[in-house]
């Protein structure tokens, strides 16, 4: 273990006011010969950074009040960085770009604090990195380049700005422009670049398969299943056998249908409705009984927990379960017997749940419908002659009526419905993006969303009332400070909002969203409010779901693609098959659930980041050949470094850097989310329409730059 700054300074504190030679300092530390030179360099660096004072005779003594803090470096794309301190009560420490030479993004470092008003706001802590304590990167992804016979690798992560020199010529065939995995052999110093060795070549950078492989490596996604897992999956039955139907209700005559996207292969859920007396509607939500096939602790189960979720890229999916399960025996395919866990619920005319019942069943989906087909059915005129299509339409109309009731009920209690469309990438035959469009969200989507929300909430309520342990899906209330900032923002737009830190906040926010629906500022207010929210996550302790205004909520409806749903299925099955509450079973789950919740939350965020990264890459690829073209757009975000513009013609967002706004000096007003010119008072704020020209596309940084026309 090498000598750390803390150890060296602690030793010098034992000799206050006394100067020591390098030999005297190092005598206190039994260092191997090869580490003594690094220790000498550390002493010199501490002196350069003002922590030690050089005195005559090449001696050193401790500077009074010298303090080192530890934390992790985050490097901004502009070159400067921040040290996020281990002590969460202290603010991040700003480090200018010129002092980041030997540090890489993610490294743990020791930092010395100085004070300066030259960077950021007055009094912002500025630091000098004294030593790298722990390196974040041992391998990295990059693009192989050859320039004047000099081979090097450009890291794919834009926060790692230094090219990596090759320690030795590559032992594997590689061509310039190809993506490689590189091992770091030595790290950068003030006078020497980093060096590394190519471990393997993924392929050409513009190959869609290589893009996915790069994302898998970059985000640490488990891609291929181990042979043991595939063997366990292939040993499972491919059809529902007579013995599998034992102890299950037979719902094969119920008119259940699946409603999914056109390209979906894994059908988690099937739904059916039936109108009853006094305007009531009965709803069946049948969910694939994955837990029947995937036993707790089995190789498939361990792999599913490791993945926690399926990851969806344009034209490609990394499934949580092997395809023989996710796309076959567990998928609720039409006209095939399948095992399911069913939530049967009865709702009144106000959308209130009157009854709920849960049980295992065998089902047979009557049709595989797409969102587009359901939308067309609901919009079409009914024919004069009764037909099977008319019967289906009747069912869909009842579904539409129930979904509307449930939606109104949720809004009434304060559930927040954000109207923020997502990007859908249209791929060509070779996997290249041909268009970027707004993903449609029609009544068919809302039907399934409302039914799944209702089932999830009903299951959570059922298990909680029986005091069973449960993996909750929670969404904590926003911080009061952020809500008050949002309150100030909407007040500037002439909207009143009561935020007092008491109950009723969700109702106030939903009331505001209803007020702005359809108005020019709707998107702006939706975005700013969403950024004020905390991120939903999994937890063994319930604090409710603020966004849904639900006291009890869990994930039950997608066990093919989400591990928490599989856990909830297991708990539900145990409760249904046990005549009395088991203290031993409850104790076991209480020990297991916190770790499962943490792992699933972390892996969910990992999957979201990977999916967003590939979407951003596809957007950049689509725009790369359109440099110089002009577009109409709207301001979608404002930051101190620039204005984000969302185009109207294609669903793509890019940045107008503040440095390119040369007609004035622009000041960022954080509380109003806008830039304002100091001389001409020109304002850039979310929602305003602008004309821009595409200036530059950087595929590596996933960055699109515009300039104002």
Image (cartoon, rainbow, N blue to C red):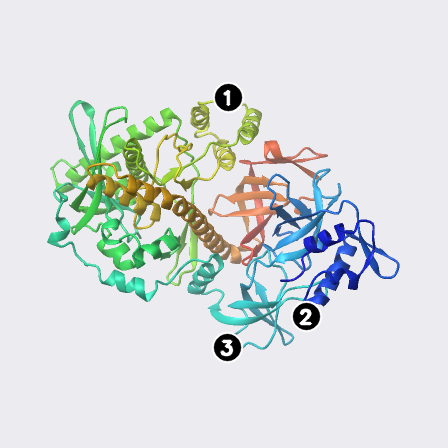
Q: Secondary structure at mark 2?
A: helix
According to the picture, the residue beneath numbered tag 1 turns out to be: 498
Counting labels gives 3
Question: 80 or 565, which lies in front?
Answer: 565
Sequence-wise, the earlier of marks 2 and 1 is: 2
Q: Residue at x 47, y 56 (%)?
A: 219
Q: Residue at x 65, y 51 (%)?
A: 78
- In the image, taking residue 72 as reference, residue 267 lies left or right, namely left
The answer to the question of whether label 1 and label 3 lie on touching residues, with beta carbons closer than 8 A, is no
Of circles 3 and 2, the one toward us is 2
Q: Is residue 164 above or below residue 407?
A: below
According to the picture, the residue beneath numbered tag 3 turns out to be: 173
> How far apart are the two marked residues, 2 and 1, measured between alpha carbons?
66 Å
> How far apart are the two marked residues, 1 and 3, measured between alpha carbons?
65 Å
Q: Is residue 35 above or below residue 669?
A: below
- In the image, taking residue 229 as reference, residue 198 lies left or right, namely right
Percent x, y of residue 603: 43, 50
Q: Residues within 10 Å of mark 1 (few under 14, many from 20)?
A: some
Sequence-wise, the earlier of marks 3 and 2 is: 2
According to the picture, the residue beneath numbered tag 2 turns out to be: 34
């Amino acid at each position: 273990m090498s000598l750390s700054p803390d150890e060296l300074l602690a030793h010098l504190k034992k000799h206050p006011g006394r100067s020591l030679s390098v030999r005297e300092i190092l005598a206190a530390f039994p260092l191997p010969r090869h580490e003594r030179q690094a220790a000498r360099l550390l002493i010199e660096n501490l002196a350069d950074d003002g922590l030690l004072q050089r005195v005559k005779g090449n001696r050193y003594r401790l500077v009074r009040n010298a303090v080192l803090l530890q934390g992790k470096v985050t490097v901004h794309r502009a070159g400067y960085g921040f040290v996020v301190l281990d002590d969460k009560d202290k603010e991040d420490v700003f480090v200018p770009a010129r002092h980041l030479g030997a540090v890489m993004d993610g490294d743990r470092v020791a930092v010395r604090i100085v004070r300066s008003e030259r960077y950021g706001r007055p009094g912002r802590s500025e630091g000098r990195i004294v030593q790298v304590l722990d390196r974040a990167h041992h391998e990295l992804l990059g693009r192989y380049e050859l320039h004047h016979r000099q081979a090097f690798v450009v890291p794919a992560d834009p926060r790692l700005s230094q090219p990596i020199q090759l320690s030795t010529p590559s032992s594997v065939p590689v061509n310039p422009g190809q993506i490689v995995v590189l091992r770091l052999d030595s790290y950068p110093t003030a006078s020497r670049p980093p060096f590394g060795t190519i471990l393997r070549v993924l392929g050409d950078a513009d190959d869609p398969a290589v893009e996915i492989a790069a994302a898998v490596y970059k985000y640490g996604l488990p891609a291929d299943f181990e042979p043991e897992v595939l063997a366990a999956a292939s040993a499972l039955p491919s059809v529902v056998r007579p013995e599998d139907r034992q102890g299950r209700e037979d719902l094969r005559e119920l008119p259940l249908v699946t409603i999914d996207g056109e390209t979906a292969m894994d059908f988690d859920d099937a739904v059916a409705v039936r109108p009853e007396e006094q305007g009531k509607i009965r709803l069946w939500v049948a969910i694939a009984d994955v837990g029947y096939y995937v036993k707790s602790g089995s190789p498939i189960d361990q792999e599913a927990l490791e993945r926690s979720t399926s990851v969806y890229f344009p034209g490609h999916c990394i499934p949580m379960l092997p395809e023989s399960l996710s796309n076959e025996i567990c998928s609720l395919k039409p006209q095939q017997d399948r095992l399911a866990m069913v939530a049967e619920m009865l709702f009144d005319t106000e959308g209130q749940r009157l009854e709920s019942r849960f049980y295992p069943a065998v089902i047979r989906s009557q049709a595989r419908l797409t969102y587009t087909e359901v939308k067309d059915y609901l919009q079409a005129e009914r024919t004069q002659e009764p037909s099977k299509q008319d019967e289906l339409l009747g069912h869909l109309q009842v579904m539409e009526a129930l979904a509307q009731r449930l939606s109104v009920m949720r809004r009434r209690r304060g559930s927040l419905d954000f109207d923020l469309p997502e990007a859908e990438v249209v791929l060509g035959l070779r996997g290249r993006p041909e268009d970027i469009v707004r993903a449609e969200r029609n009544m068919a989507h809302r039907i399934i969303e409302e039914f799944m929300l209702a089932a999830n909430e009903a299951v959570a309520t059922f298990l909680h009332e029986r005091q069973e342990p449960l993996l909750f899906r929670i969404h904590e209330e926003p911080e009061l400070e952020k809500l008050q900032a949002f309150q100030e923002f909407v007040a500037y737009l002439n909207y009143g909002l009561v935020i007092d830190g008491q109950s009723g906040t969700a109702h106030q926010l939903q009331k505001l969203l209803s007020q702005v629906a359809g108005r020019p500022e709707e998107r702006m207010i939706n975005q700013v409010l969403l950024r004020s929210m905390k991120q939903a996550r999994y937890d063994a302790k319930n604090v409710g779901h603020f966004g849904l205004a639900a006291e009890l909520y869990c994930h039950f409806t997608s066990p093919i693609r989400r591990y928490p749903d599989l856990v909830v299925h297991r708990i539900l099955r145990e409760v249904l098959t046990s005549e009395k509450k088991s203290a031993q079973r409850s104790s076991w789950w209480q020990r297991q659930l916190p770790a499962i919740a943490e792992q699933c939350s972390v892996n969910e965020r990992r999957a979201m980041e990977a999916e967003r990264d590939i979407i951003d890459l596809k957007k950049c690829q689509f725009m790369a050949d359109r440099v110089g073209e002009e577009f109409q757009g709207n301001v979608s975000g404002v930051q101190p470094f620039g204005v984000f513009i969302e185009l109207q013609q294609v669903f793509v967002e890019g940045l107008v850097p503040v440095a390119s706004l040369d007609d004035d000096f622009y000041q960022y007003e954080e509380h109003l989310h806008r830039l304002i010119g100091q001389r001409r008072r020109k304002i850039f704020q979310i929602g305003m329409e602008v004309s821009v020209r595409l200036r530059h596309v950087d595929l590596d940084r996933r960055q699109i730059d515009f300039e104002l026309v």
